[in-house]
Amino acid sequence: MALSVKHLLGIRELSLDDIHTIFQAADRFKEVLQQPIKKVPALRDTTIANIFFENSTRTRISFELAQKRLSADVVNFSASGSSVSKGETLIDTVHNILAMKVDMVVMRHSSSGAPWFLARHTDAAIINAGDGTNEHPTQALLDAFSMREKLGDLKGRRVAIIGDIMHSRVALSNIYCLGKLGAELMVCGPPTLIPKGIEEMGVRVEYDVRKALQWCEVANVLRIQLERQNKPLFSTLREYALYYGINRDMMQSLEQEVIIMHPGPINRGVELASDVADSSSSIILDQVQNGVAIRMAVVYLLSGTTQA
Ligand code: CP
């Protein structure tokens, strides 16, 4: 099993075969994670640096756990508390880490394109753990893997991505990934949070969340990314919750079952009420669990090793 790419920078660069190869490896690693000994020796000779220039809970822990389950040596770097605050550049920071004989770098950065820049300047395999408003490839892979677990083949399945589409790297990576897998896609949110021309990517646009929920089989709900908005794009969070927040009454009014997903972190009571986030329709914690198997698959396949 091998991928057509040396790095995982974005879903846009992956072929459909690459996505299926990652899912097949993740299926195997998910079985490993259910064994009493949740570890394989595959990456015993591999050293990986996780470098995070932006906050993270799920992605950072999930990558670290995935790497440790593969027996890799792992070093973690976060920009806060590092020499970045003394003016050190991204490329100097990474060259210093690589000089310590690191084979692979997992990077999150607030600037879109930062992992591509890094890939041009280093020999190590680079995995994008989220770059600005651009892509979050492992999130899209774990989202699609979790949908596939519930629905089987995603060809023709109706998925609505609801929330702040404009600022979301999860939305873009989901559109690429689910599009390649043949799903029918809709984005829904206030007009100010939907990028102009997004229909050209083959997605429908809906501004009424009730209509989006009536249409879809899966709702992937996103939070409002206030940290990426330079100027207000809607009046208040209260008003957003009133018009776009998904609550139990809305879910109970639907004629069909809708699977609720969210990449986290959830702003409870804004985009999602707790009684929906914690309901039997929600597979949010399944997504988190599948994230470890997907990241094991990606790290393993990019390491070039053949001994899982
Ligand atoms: N889904 C996601 O990227 O979460 P974190 O920001 O906590 O890593």
Image (cartoon, rainbow, N blue to C red):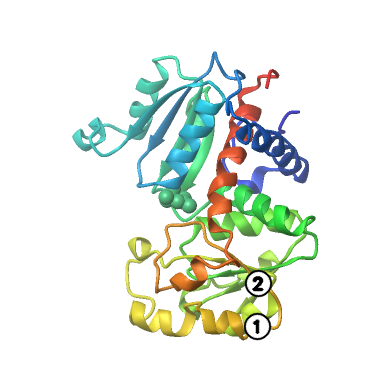
Residue at the image point whose x is 50% and y is 65% from the top: 278
Closer-to-camera residue (266/167): 266
Contact between marks 1 and 2 (CB within 8 A): the answer is yes
Measured in 3D between alpha carbons, the distance from the residue under mark 1 to the one under mark 2, in whole angstroms, is: 8 Å
Expressed as whole percent of the image width and height from the top left, the position of residue 196 reads 55, 73
Q: Is residue 308 above or below residue 204?
A: above
Give the residue at mark 1.
Answer: 254
Q: What residue occupies the far left of the structure in this picture?
A: 86
Q: Dot 2, how many residues are within 10 Å of its Cα: few (below 14), some (14-19), or many (20+)?
A: some
Q: Is residue 289 above or below residue 8?
A: below
Q: Quadrant of the C terminus?
A: top right
Expressed as whole percent of the image width and height from the top left, the position of residue 162 reads 55, 71
Residue at the image point whose x is 66% and y is 29% from the top: 301
Residue at the image point whose x is 69% and y is 38% from the top: 22
In the rendered structure, the answer to whether residue 235 lies left or right of residue 172 reads left
Q: Dot 1, how many residues are within 10 Å of its Cα: few (below 14), some (14-19), or many (20+)?
A: some
- Asked if the beta carbon under badge 2 is closer than 8 A to the nearest atom of ligand 1, the reply is no
